[in-house]
Image: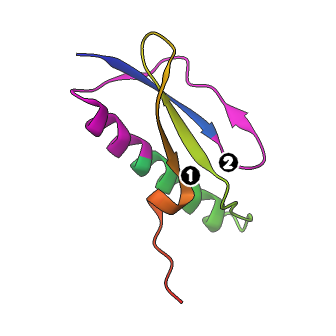
Amino acid sequence: MPRYYFDLNNGSGFVRDTEGRVEDSLTDARTVAIEALRGVISGEISEGKAVSRRSFISVRSETNLQVAKVYFEDAVTIED
């Protein structure tokens, strides 16, 4: 099973994932990225911080290639 790395850019900084996670597929890795981004966003909200719509998680493969990118809009649904 492949290992994926989840790098976070939340608008105010960048955090590179150095450990990664083994997942069955890219689809599973993308789901992990969505859940992680939701966790980051909810943490920022609970701390009273601003949330950037430019927040995203970049998913990298074991060969260091970006294989997916999950944006704020992929993780959160906002209704008017």
| Marked residue nearer the N-terminal end (2 or 1) | 2
Amino acid type shown at disc 1:
Val
Where residue 43 appears, as percent x and y from the top left, is: 58, 57
Is residue 79 depicted above or below 9 in this figure?
Answer: below
**C-alpha distance separating marks 2 and 1:** 8 Å
Contact between labelled residues 1 and 2, with CB atoms less than 8 Å apart: yes
Residue 12 shown left or right of residue 52 in the figure? right
Q: Which residues are magenta?
A: 9-33
Where residue 78 appears, as percent x and y from the top left, is: 51, 77
Q: Which residue is mark 2?
A: 10
Q: Is residue 49 magenta?
A: no
Where residue 26 appears, as percent x and y from the top left, is: 30, 32
Residue 6 shown left or right of residue 14 in the figure? left
Residue 55 shown left or right of residue 38 in the figure? right
Q: Residue at x 72, y 68 (%)?
A: 48
Q: Which residue is mark 1?
A: 40
Is residue 63 depicted above or below 12 in this figure?
Answer: above
Q: Residue at x 22, y 16 (%)?
A: 1
Is 59 or 43 nearer to us in this picture? 59
* Mark 2 element type: loop
